[in-house]
Amino acid sequence: MPEGDVRSLVDAIREVREHITACAVCGGIADGERCAICADPARDRGVICVVEQQKDVLTVERSGAFTGLYHVLNGVISPLDGIGPEELNIKPLLERCKDAAVVEIVIATNPSVEGDATSLYLSKIIKPSGIKVTRIAHGIPVGADLEFADGATIYQSLKCRVEM
């Protein structure tokens, strides 16, 4: 690679490192105090989608199916790795739940033992406040063949089925 291109790449990486931070509200990726999603007045302020990592916000956004706000936990409960609830970004979520506008928390953690434990923990501590707590469905991906799905995926698909 020509030296000028290398310098440009290094400068771009330095620029990102110096100017990209975590949003003060949701913990997502921001280039100022608040991210573009939290600053957008058109977003539904009554629904907060809780995700494990900052990159998960981008994944959900790409779907175009969610118009609310987000909250990034920065991990999941994992006792084997020494990660308990106190190591996660949960306290700010509970503070956000005090806002009367919040009516639903959508938990979008990964379908793993740790993700399920985290979702159960969050549900247990949020439900007493009267806020509806939901979990994203898990199951067979669109376009996949049923014959290639594992038993756990089929189980979740059946468990989370919806009426037509």
Image (spheres, rainbow, N blue to C red):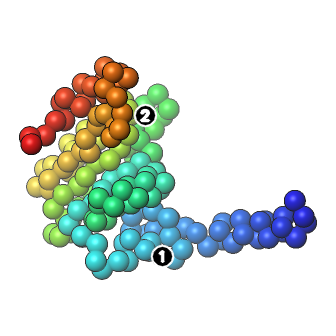
108 with respect to 80 (left or right): left
- Location of the N terminus by quadrant is bottom right
Disc 1 marks which amino acid? Glu
> Badge 2 local density, few (<14 within 10 Å), some, or many (20+)?
some
Residue denoted by label 1 = 33
The image position of residue 69, as x and y in percent, is 31, 65
- In the image, residue 103 sits, relative to residue 44, either above or below, namely above
Disc 2 marks which amino acid? Ser
Counting the numbered discs, the total is 2
Quarter holding residue 15 = bottom right
Residue at horizontal 58 percent and vertical 69 percent from the top: 20
Residue denoted by label 2 = 78
> Badge 1 local density, few (<14 within 10 Å), some, or many (20+)?
some
Q: Which mark is residue 138?
A: none
Q: Residue furthest right?
A: 3
Question: Is any part of residue 143 visible from this angle?
Answer: yes
132 with respect to 80 (left or right): left
Residue at horizontal 31 percent and vertical 33 percent from the top: 140
> SS class of the residue under badge 1?
loop
123 with respect to 88 (left or right): left
The image position of residue 144, as x and y in percent, is 36, 33
Camera-side residue of 17 and 12: 12
Residue at horizontal 33 percent and vertical 53 percent from the top: 50
CA–CA distance in space, label 2 to label 1: 30 Å
- In the image, residue 116 sits, relative to residue 51, either above or below, namely above
Camera-side residue of 64 and 53: 64
Camera-side residue of 145 and 126: 145
The image position of residue 40, as x and y in percent, is 35, 77
Q: Are marks 2 and 1 in contact (CB under 8 Å)?
A: no
Dot 2 or dot 1: first in sequence order is 1
